[in-house]
Amino acid sequence: MDEQELIAGCRRKDPSFQKMLYNTYAPKMMSVCYRYVTDKDTAQDLLQDGFLKVFTKIGTYTGEGSFAGWIRRIFVTTSLEYLRRHALMKFTCPLDDYDSQIEDDGNASALSRLTAEELLALIAKLPAGCRTVFNLYAIEGYSHSEIAGMLKIKESSSQSQLVRARKMLQRTIEPIIGEAYARQKVQ
């Protein structure tokens, strides 16, 4: 079955097509939700809320852009609405020198030594504001201007949150990479 048939079946509110759509996209959308809230039960609730919106609004999908991108935007928006509603997005990160630039000290390959799961776990530990901006910018691909509009913050706040998130990740990753490098030398 192709995507257009799946969309048409969902527009007809056919439960079998809705189940296929859910089974196709649920694992990826659960990952999206979990990146923003970092609590599995809450992420599961957001997954259900997001699919209710998908099934309710599927008639508004115009066919412009990818269907997967359309669905992803719904889940990102659902997650952001939750964070806003529960006042969980604080736009400060506990970092000694907030505005310092990230130094390139030759550890650019540090990220390549981490698995995706390890990196996502580190991102999940960031404070909500930093994590949200990092996810929107680095993973979802939004610009600072778009993020500022979505979160109702200044563009400069989005930029500073990204710098802070990167700096925190860098400080967390460096010791991990150092340990891995030391183990590798011993072997």
Image (tube, grey):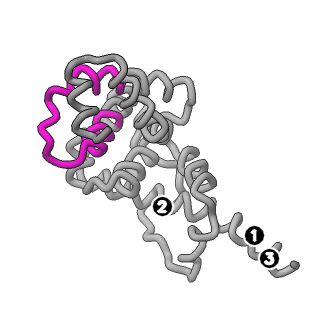
**Mark on residue 166?**
2
Q: Looking at the image, which is closer to me, 105 or 77?
A: 77
Q: How many marks?
A: 3
Q: Position of residue 37 (x, y in %)?
A: 48, 34
Looking at the figure, which quarter contains the C terminus? bottom right
User: Which stretch is magenta?
Assistant: 50-75
Q: Position of residue 123 (x, y in %)?
A: 53, 50
Q: Are marks 1 and 3 in contact (CB under 8 Å)?
A: yes
Pick out the residue farthest to the right. 186
Q: Which residue is mark 1?
A: 180
Q: Secondary structure at mark 2?
A: helix
Question: Which of marks 2 and 3 precedes in the sequence?
Answer: 2
Q: Is residue 18 above or below residue 30?
A: above
Q: Which residue is mark 3?
A: 184
Using the numbered discs, state the Cα–Cα distance from disc 1 to disc 3 in whole angstroms.
6 Å
Q: Which class describes the residues within 10 Å of circle 3: few (<14), some (14-19), or many (20+)? A: few
Indicate whether residue 67 is drawn in magenta: yes
Q: Secondary structure at mark 3?
A: helix
Left or right of 21? Residue 4 is left
Left or right of 84? Residue 131 is right
Who's the residue at 41% across and 44% down the image?
132
Q: Position of residue 31 (x, y in %)?
A: 49, 40
Q: Is residue 78 above or below residue 114?
A: above
Label 2 is placed on what type of residue? Arg
Q: Which quadrant of the view contains residue 168? A: bottom right
Using the numbered discs, state the Cα–Cα distance from disc 3 to disc 2 in whole angstroms.
26 Å
Q: Looking at the image, which is closer to me, 105 or 29?
A: 29
Nearer the observer: mark 3 or 2; the answer is 3
Question: Which of marks 2 and 1 precedes in the sequence?
Answer: 2
Q: Are marks 1 and 2 in contact (CB under 8 Å)?
A: no
